[in-house]
Image (cartoon, helix red, strand yellow):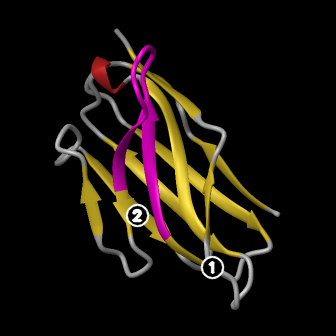
Amino acid sequence: QVQLVESGGGLVQPGGSLRLSCAASGTIASIGRMGWYRQAPGKQREWVALISRGGNTNYADSVKGRFTISRDNAKDTVYLQMNSLKPEDTAVYYCNADISTSWVEVAGNYWGQGTQVTVSP
């Protein structure tokens, strides 16, 4: 089985910073694309940032220039550095990854349980 466990959420003032981490564990052969999504109350889940195994990144326009996604392939971990946080960044942040549990099977898509980020004075 595969698990994604996020950490690093919390309460921060506008303009502040947080760093989210997401570690994959279990039977893992390889991890492809990893990413972060978020869901605010009453809204649909939206993608925030994606990173390929090779390090190519993509960001939603709403976070471009403020958030940075990175990964450590040796640790099966993806990070999201969030700077200049705004109240509209308040949401539950979810980690997502394409993970192969063996070298002969197609990768499955996995989600973490989510971590709350609240930006408030």
Residue position for label 2: 70
Give the vertical position of 19 relative to 33 (above or below).
above
The residue at 42%/22% (across/down) is: 40
Mark 1: amino acid: Val
Residue 8 in picture, x, y percent from top left: 56, 39
The residue at 25%/53% (across/down) is: 59
Residue position for label 1: 106
The residue at 49%/36% (across/down) is: 93
Check residue 41 for magenta coloring: yes
Disc 1 or 2, which lies upstream in sequence?
A: 2
Name the secondary structure under disc 2.
Answer: strand
Residue 83 in picture, x, y percent from top left: 29, 39
Q: Residues within 10 Å of mark 2 (few under 14, many from 20)?
A: many
Quadrant of the frame with the C terminus: top left
**Residue 33 as seen in the image, left or right of residue 64:** right
Residue 10 in picture, x, y percent from top left: 53, 26
Name the secondary structure under disc 1.
Answer: loop
Disc 1/disc 2 C-alpha distance (Å)? 24 Å
Residue 1, picture quadrant = bottom right
